[in-house]
Amino acid sequence: MRSGEYGSKEVTIRVNGLDTPWHADDIAAAAEAGPAGVVVPKVNSADDVHAIVDGLVKGGAPAHTKIWAMTETPVAMLDAVAIAGASDRLAVLVMGTNDLAKELHAEHVPGRQPLLTGLGLCLLAARATGKVILDGVYNDITDAAGFEAECLQGRQLGFDGKTLIHPSQIEPANAVWAPTAEAIDDARELIATFDDAIASGKGVVTHKGRMIENLHVDNARRVLAVADAIAART
């Protein structure tokens, strides 16, 4: 962990949950290792987050070691805002969709209709508190088309990325979440069109037949920021 041989990658350590006899020792060991993040399952409340923070502080974790809280129960869905806003040290919400489906007595079906309420509640919490949020795993590693469809759904819903369970899922997930060349070009053109229109005193701005305003410019800048971040890593 301290070798620095992971390059620009963020390295996280997954520990056992607070309700297990191994959690305290796991947190202490993770704190000493000082990764970018500690992934904690079954985080159900703000009190849980506070307990994790206390464990990291007592273990001497560096300031850059953040909490990645897995939200995977009905209680967590209903308390997502409190969880996400409980500490500045909490940086990421991670959807635990397998456990959530189990707790709901729901089936895994294309489109994930039984899970959409929970996914939406956690997305709202993440955006309300300025945290990153990752979609849950896709279980069938032989179903490339199904995996790509679920990645696309996750991106369209607003997730920042997806948790993966097999190396074969890395490239297609990256392809879905990375802006395409066309999207990058369109973002640049939209910003230029808007800036030119404002500079010339126009009250109404259109881009490729669409009315645009500041919110569209903000979205375009976010596309470019993601593209720049990917380029910097590669």
Image (tube, helix red, strand yellow):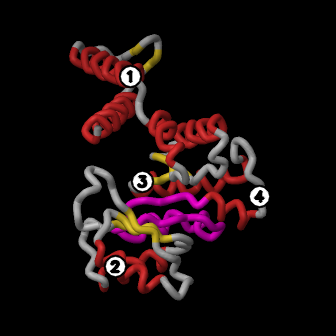
SS type, badge 1: helix
Around disc 3, counting alpha carbons within 10 Å, would you say few (fewer than 14), some (14 to 19), or many (20 or more)?
A: some
Relative side of 174 to 202, left or right: right
Q: Quadrant of residue 217?
A: top left
For this rendering, which residue is in front, 195 or 201? Answer: 195
Q: Are marks 4 and 2 in contact (CB under 8 Å)?
A: no
Q: Callout 4, which amino acid?
A: Ala
**Residue assigned mark 2:** 56
Q: Callout 3, which amino acid?
A: Val
State the separation of the CA atoms marked 3 and 1: 24 Å
Q: Looking at the image, is 188 positioned above or below residue 89?
A: above
The part of the chain drawn in magenta is 67-96
Q: Is residue 53 visible?
A: yes
Relative side of 97 to 211, left or right: right
x and y, in percent, of residue 221 in the image = 32, 32
Q: Callout 2, which amino acid?
A: Leu
State the separation of the CA atoms marked 4 and 2: 35 Å
State the separation of the CA atoms marked 2 and 3: 20 Å
Q: Callout 1, which amino acid?
A: Ala
x and y, in percent, of residue 55 in the image = 37, 82
- Which residue ends up furthest to the bottom in the rendered image? 21
Label located before the other in sequence (4 or 2): 2
SS type, badge 4: loop
x and y, in percent, of residue 93 in the image = 47, 60
Residue at 45% across, 46% down: 160
Q: Quadrant of the N terminus?
A: bottom left
**Residue assigned mark 3:** 132
Label located before the other in sequence (4 or 3): 4
**Residue assigned mark 1:** 181
SS type, badge 3: strand
